[in-house]
Amino acid sequence: MPISEHTIVIIGAGVLGLSTATLLQTKDPKCKVVIMATELPTTPSPTADYASVWAGAHYRPIPGTIRQLEDEAELAIRTAEIMKRIARETPEAGVGTMPGIEYLDDPPEANLTLKTGDVYAGPDDHFRVLEKAELLPGAQWGCEYDSYSVNVPVYSKWLLDKFITGGGQVIQHKLKAAEEAFDCAQEAGLGTVSTVVNCSGRNFDRDPRMNIIRGQTVLVRQQYDKTVTRQNRDGTWAFLIPRPRGGGTIVGGSKEIGDWEAGVRPETRQKLLQQSVDSFPDFVDSVEQFDVLKDNVGRRPWRDGGLRIEVEALDSNRRIVHGYGAGGRGYELSWGAAERIVELTAQRVLQAQR
């Protein structure tokens, strides 16, 4: 479904905006794609609002029976397929395949019915239920499967380079609302733009369903060889997410809904490092041994009800294709969501051309 000779503006240079932009280029090289964003992967001192550059970014399946989780599971499996292909074919992109391990202190009933060999993370995922002797103290259930993780600084810059090399244009500009992109595009000499793709993350806080999740993690120099998550009985988490190609390991993490604090909380850092030692002593067995590189704080754009992927018609000539609100799962859902956004964008552009 070609979109040729059309200019499309994408708002946002987070993982979803960058993935959508490069996918649009692949779909139709004659289509002119422009990213309009406040911050870029090359921004020297990104803010907490630019959540994509602070992410841990690994694949941990979240099966569920409600429609939102079923839908996100589809997007995540599709994304995992593409991420694993990138890891095989373009290792310099910063994606690496590795085992994913989970330990649950209070597993839901559905997990207890799973058997080794079932499909959990996608086709051919080598899913295995851990034996009791393999569990961490206090854990009641655990599993292992094929997963991946992302070296976020490397990967986001790789996506941006791929976009620019493919003929994409970047305009660094702070918008106050998605509809401003139409006039801004005209002022920038792009001519009349009829389609804007809104991958702004929070939709400029104009969606009543939107909130943020404050996430604080610690990047340490030590390199782990798998991505591992423990869910405690009280609902808190401990996890280790390696950054491939020698990028260290993310130790996490906090999940604070509606907390807008952008600064690092030293007490949270201490808690994260200590719970890592308590849960994963095979990684580092005392807090003093950690070689801390950076504290990360990101405001993840969480939307009640899940990602918004739909078209909003402003008038007969202008439409916005929305794609925002992934919360802490931006990387996990990125390619699956981008495919849906691109398909919707192509349909609307072709309708406008008739």
Image (cartoon, rainbow, N blue to C red):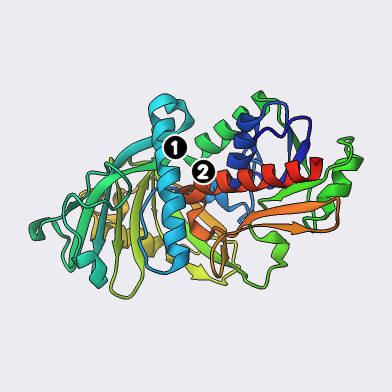
Residue beneath disc 1: 82
User: Residue at point 42% right, 27% down?
Assistant: 91
Q: Is residue 150 left or right of residue 11?
A: left
Depth check, front residue: 43 or 31: 31
Residue identified by numbered label 2 = 335
Q: Relative to residue 40, is residue 200 depicted above or below?
A: below
Q: Considering the image in quadrants, where does the C terminus appear?
A: top right
What separation in Å lies between label 2 and label 1 (alpha carbons)?
7 Å
Q: Nearer the viewer, residue 235 or 179?
A: 179
Say if 116 sits above or below 161 in the image: below
Residue 81 in picture, x, y percent from top left: 40, 39
Mark 2–mark 1 CB contact (< 8 Å):
yes
Residue 197: numbered disc: none
Q: Is residue 22 left or right of residue 38?
A: left
Of the numbered discs 2 and 1, the one sitting upstream in the chain is: 1
Does residue 15 appear anywhere in the picture? no
Percent position (x, y) of residue 48? 60, 56
Left or right, 38 with reference to 315: left
